[in-house]
Image: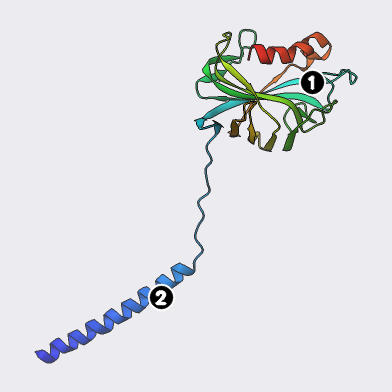
Amino acid sequence: MKTICRCFGLLAVISFLFFACDKEEKKTEEEKKPEEKIPEVKENFLKIGDSTYKLVGGMLENYGVCEDMLDEEWAHDGYNIDLTLISQGLQISNNYEEEDFQGKGHMVYFEMFTSNPDCLDSGKYSFSTNIPFPVKSFDYAMYFLNYVEGEEDFDVFFLSEAEVNVKIKDDIYEISFITTDENGVKVEGYYKGKLKYFDYSYEYSNDRALKSNKKKNHIKIR
C-alpha cells in the first residue's frame, strides 16, 4: 500500500512540476504579447479657471467674402465663418427669424477666416491684427457665461491671443484651444462632433452697414 501511495505521490509531484512549467511558459508568452491599448475617449469641455462645463454642440455662420479690401475694419481674405460652441443648457434654434439660442448656458465664440465657404479649413488658426485678416486666422474671440437669448444679465469676456486647432473628417470637427481671457484667467476647450451650418453670405454681401453692425451685435446680444 505504501508503495502504491509513493507511486501516486511521485505521479502527483511530476504532474505538479509539469503543470507548473506549462503555466510558467504560458505566463512568459503572455508577458511577451504587446498590451492592447484602449483608445482614449476625450470628453467635450470648456474649462474657465477651475470651472469646467460640458460642450454639447456648435454652429458655423458664413458671412461671405470681403468685397471692399480697403475697409479698415472688415477687410479679410477668404470667407468669414464664425464658430460658436455651446454648453449644456443651451440649444441652437433652427428658426433664425425668432432667436439664435434656446435655454441658458455658456458658450465660446471665434470670428474666423477660411478658404472654404462651406466649412472651416483643417489646421491651426492664429489670432491676427493684420488687415486684411489672412486665411486661417481670427480677429477676436470671447466667451459668455449664463447666457439667455434676449436678456442682458450675462457675463462676456474677451480672449487674448490664442491658437485654435481644427481637424475635419467626414463632417466631424475636432476643435481645441488654450488661451487666457482679459483678466488673465486660463481658458481651454475641446469639442468633437458635428456643427450646424448657416449661410448669411447673400444677406451680408451687398450691405456694409450689416457688416459693421455684425461685431456690435455679437458683443451686445450674444
Determine the image quadrant of residue 190. top right
Circle 2 Cα neighbour tier, 10 Å, few/some/many (<14 / 14–19 / ≥20): few
Residue 25, which numbered label?
2
Q: Which of 11/126 is in front?
A: 126
Residue 135 appears in view:
yes
Circle 1 Cα neighbour tier, 10 Å, few/some/many (<14 / 14–19 / ≥20): many
Percent of width and height locating residue 120: 72, 31
Residue farthest left in this picture: 1
Residue at horizontal 45 percent and vertical 68 percent from the top: 31
Residue farthest right in this picture: 70
Percent of width and height locating residue 175: 64, 35
Determine the image quadrant of residue 63. top right
- Residue behind mark 1: 64
Vertical order, 42 against 200 (above or below): below
Distance (Cα) linking label 2 and label 1: 67 Å
Residue at horizontal 61 percent and vertical 19 percent from the top: 156
Do callouts 2 and 1 mark residues in contact (Cβ within 8 Å)?
no
Q: Tag 1: residue type?
A: Gly
Residue at horizontal 51 percent and vertical 31 percent from the top: 52
Q: What element does badge 2 sit on?
A: helix
